[in-house]
Image (tube, rainbow, N blue to C red):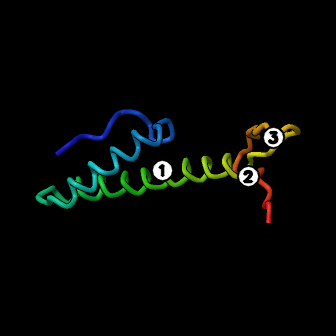
Amino acid sequence: MTQPTDTPIDRLSFDDALGELQRAVADLETGGLPLERSIALYERGVALHERCASLLSEAELKVQQLVTRAGGAIAAIDVRPDEAVDAE
């Protein structure tokens, strides 16, 4: 059984959050944990999943906001998810 990191979830990188989520799932699948530990691990797993989904959404927005400048150069526009405009 692995212990979660002490790093707050909102400060984890995508790779760190995904790795911890994968370890939590493996621990839960193995079973044999006390009920309280299983619930705490499940709750952290949900939060880790939400962190990964949020980071993926932000990355997708950055890719979608690429624009072609004069001369064919590509530039990324830094956009927050709540400021994004639908290009469709």
Image coordinates of residue 41 in percent, x first then y, are 29, 53
Residue located at (39% from left, 47% from top): 18
Estimate how packed mark 1 is, as few (under 14), some (14 to 19) or many (20 or more) residues with alpha carbons within 10 Å.
Answer: many
Image coordinates of residue 53 in percent, x first then y, are 51, 55
Q: Which residue is mark 3?
A: 72
Q: Which residue is mark 2?
A: 82
Viewed as shown, does residue 16 lie left or right of 25? right
The C terminus sits in image quarter: bottom right
Q: CA distance from mark 3 to mark 2?
A: 28 Å
Q: Amino acid at mark 3?
A: Gly
Looking at the rendered structure, which numbered label has been put on residue 78?
none
Estimate how packed mark 2 is, as few (under 14), some (14 to 19) or many (20 or more) residues with alpha carbons within 10 Å.
Answer: few
Q: Amino acid at mark 1?
A: Cys
Q: CA distance from mark 2 to mark 1?
A: 17 Å
Q: Amino acid at mark 2?
A: Asp
Q: Which residue is mark 1?
A: 52
**Mark 2 vs 1, N-terminal side:** 1
Nearer mark to the viewer, of 3 and 2:
3
Image coordinates of residue 4 in percent, x first then y, are 30, 40
Q: Are the two marked residues, 1 and 3, in contact with CB atoms closer than 8 angstroms?
A: no
